[in-house]
Image: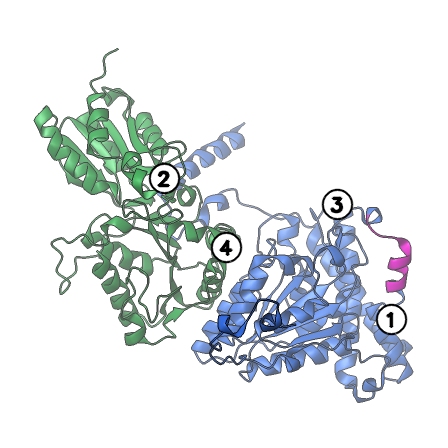
Chain colours: A green, B blue
Amino acid sequence: MAQALTRAMRDAMAEDPTVHVMGEDVGTLGGVFRITDGLAKEFGEERCTDTPLAEAGILGAAVGMAMYGLRPVVEMQFDAFAYPAFEQLISHVAKMRNRTRGAMPLPITIRVPYGGGIGGVEHHCDSSEAYYVATPGLHVVTPATVEDAYGLLRASIASDDPVVFLEPKRLYWSKADWRPEAPAAVPGIGKALVRRTGTSATLITYGPSLPVCLEAAEAAREEGWDLEVVDLRSLVPFDEDTVVESVRRTGRAVVVHEAGGFGGPGAEIAARVTERCFHHLEAPVLRVTGFDIPYPPPMLEKHHLPGVDRILDTVARLQWEN
Amino acid sequence: MTVQELPGAGASHRSTQPPAWSPRTDAAPLLPDPEPYRVLGTEAADRLDPELMRRCYAELVRGRRYNAQATALTKQGRLAVYPSTVGQEACEIAAALVLEEQDWLFPSYRDTLAAVARGLDPVQALTLLRGDWHTGYDPREHRIAPLSTPLATQLPHAVGLAHAARLRGDDVVALAMVGDGGTSEGDFHEALNFAAVWQAPVVFLVQNNGFAISVPLAKQTAAPTLAHKAVGYGMPGRLVDGNDIAAMHEVLSEAVRRARAGGGPTLIEAVTYRMEAHTNADDATRYRGDAEVEAWKAHDPVDLLERELTARGIIDEAAIQAVRDDAEAMAAALREGMNADPVVDPMDLFAHVYAEQTDRLREQAAMLRAELEAEDQA
């Protein structure tokens, strides 16, 4: 996935001279995860810029650059390091189009490596998507496959609106059937995808939890469950129709994500599914999420992150009896 | 006493020298003068450009009248709120006058007057404070960023825009305005640091008007002056009398020239005073005494220039009257413009959130449309 992301930026920069990459350590080092590797060498330090260490400054400067017609791609080094930039994000990035009555859209892509499962120490593993999805004016996308990493990042950079692009850290090193010589077409932002068809229940998920859900779906076959898995790919906009169609077919739904459950995206999705599928539902919409705790130390994270067993236990609870 | 000389710190504990270190910048030329720079009432006024000063005078008088009119409009309920710049007109006008057409102004919420002096239609400039829309103009058309209500957050925008313009090879300078309270914000620091590291063509103008709402400067900073903060970033700091429009114009012009020539950013502290309350919602008598206000009244920016220009024969009674008549006409036009009820379209709520409407917003827009239709039928 890391290479697909690099390639997406490289291709975008080659095609469009207004695309600029900026952030901490993105130049000479190529980023702490090497996602911007080689960009400074190929396009120069003016288009792939090592900035001072200041997230509000990085995003604030990107706002000014976008005001002048550039398309900045900003790297926030880690999920929890993006928080100093929240005022810029919420008060300016998300609102500039609205404040100026459409006169000044801001085509900024904010790449945030997020989530746990890599044994990182504190402040390196937050699942911060709930903060972003609660902010009108932002798009929020997260790829779960190598192909989507490329396609969604291209779509994000091409978008005339700001996009928070959440990169599941633990999938950076995932390899898959991706041919960099012929990357798949850009899927566009806001389209969910049925990754696995099934009949007994729908698992609704995104980003780092997709591989876990697919694994759980395989394991569930032994229990006699044929699970459908929907990958949201985009949290804002939320592709409600794909989700609703799936749940109406299967009659049961579980939302799975790493972020805490209270006020997490799963709460919203469960509510929407209930509103639109009430008469099709055989059981309440259930959620498997991270606990409502600050992200735990690495030696405890396996107990916190939704895993296959917790998903299967929850699926079992879908055999609802009044 | 150095560390080596401390008792017990023998040579055996310190067998190596640290690698050679040389500072990146000589700090001395960056330091501001100890007193605010002044022109009016000094010998420097001998070299005033009469034409420029007549223009400054006319703009100052208009600015004063504009402040009075806008304040009156809050009393009539036409404006929700107006943060007055009475006493600070010289800063506002000079900021507008030193910019070329292609340059950009980044105003704070208090700097409506600077935007108007740059040529923005007064009614458009007031939509934020009237409440019909946040920004009533196209920022690109006027090269005036939206008035920023969050403090100092517009400063990094100015840096980014100036940086982008320079990358493109365009001759553009960004002038960003902030108050004394805003200098305590993190974005102030980050903006100055970025600007200096990138050598961006930006001028930072701090209007030190004495108070951040009610909190005096002494409780805001322990720095000798706000201009001194520049040194820590590696840019020059200038201290100037903010009520002296000739001094303001000169110092700002020099900084703009320097930025345009590739010399990088400058931090300017204009020492001025907010004669009125923070806004009409504030009671200034709770935090300051009459004597202080009276002392500043004696150093009024309009009077200062009027006295100097009259004494030098650059303006006379007839010219003063003509300028006042012009300001009166501007005020009348503003009153007329503001007395018309703004037409707002409720469907605008959804029109400018995203380039393409999301399903969610389409649904909510349909709900509102149905409510409006039901109201119409009732």
Q: Do labels 4 and 2 share a chain?
A: yes
What label sits on residue A296 in the rendered view?
2
Q: Spatial distance from mark 3 to mark 2, Cα to Cα?
A: 46 Å
Residue B290 colored magenta? yes
Residue B38 appears in the rendering: yes
Q: In this view, does B374 lie to the left or right of A228?
A: right
Most frequent secondary structure within the magenta stretch: helix
Q: Earlier in the sequence, mark 3 or mark 1?
A: 3
> Which residue in the protein does label 1 denote?
B303
Would you place residue A182 above or below residue A314 in this image? below
Disc number lying in front (3 or 4): 4
Q: Residue furthest top?
A: A322
* Residue located 83% across and 79% down the image: B40
Chain of the residue displaying label 2? A
Q: Do the residues labelled 3 and 1 touch (CB within 8 Å)?
A: no
Q: Earlier in the sequence, mark 4 or mark 2?
A: 4
Query: Do pointers 3 and 2 mark residues of a single chain?
Result: no
Return the residue nearer the eye: B11 or B283: B11
User: Looking at the rendering, in which quadrant would you find the N terminus of chain B?
Assistant: bottom right
- Mark 2 and mark 1, same subunit? no
Q: Which of A202 and B128 is in front in this view?
A: A202
Residue annotated with mark 4:
A88
Q: Position of residue B25 (x, y in %)?
A: 56, 80
Q: Nearer the viewer, residue B352 or B254?
A: B254
Whole-Å distance between the Cαs marked 2 and 1? 65 Å
Q: Are marks 4 and 1 in contact (CB under 8 Å)?
A: no
Q: Mark 1 lies on which chain?
A: B
- Relative to B237, is B362 on the left or the right? left
**Amino acid on which the number 4 mark rests in the picture:** Gln
Report if the CB atoms under discs 2 and 1 are less than 8 Å apart.
Answer: no
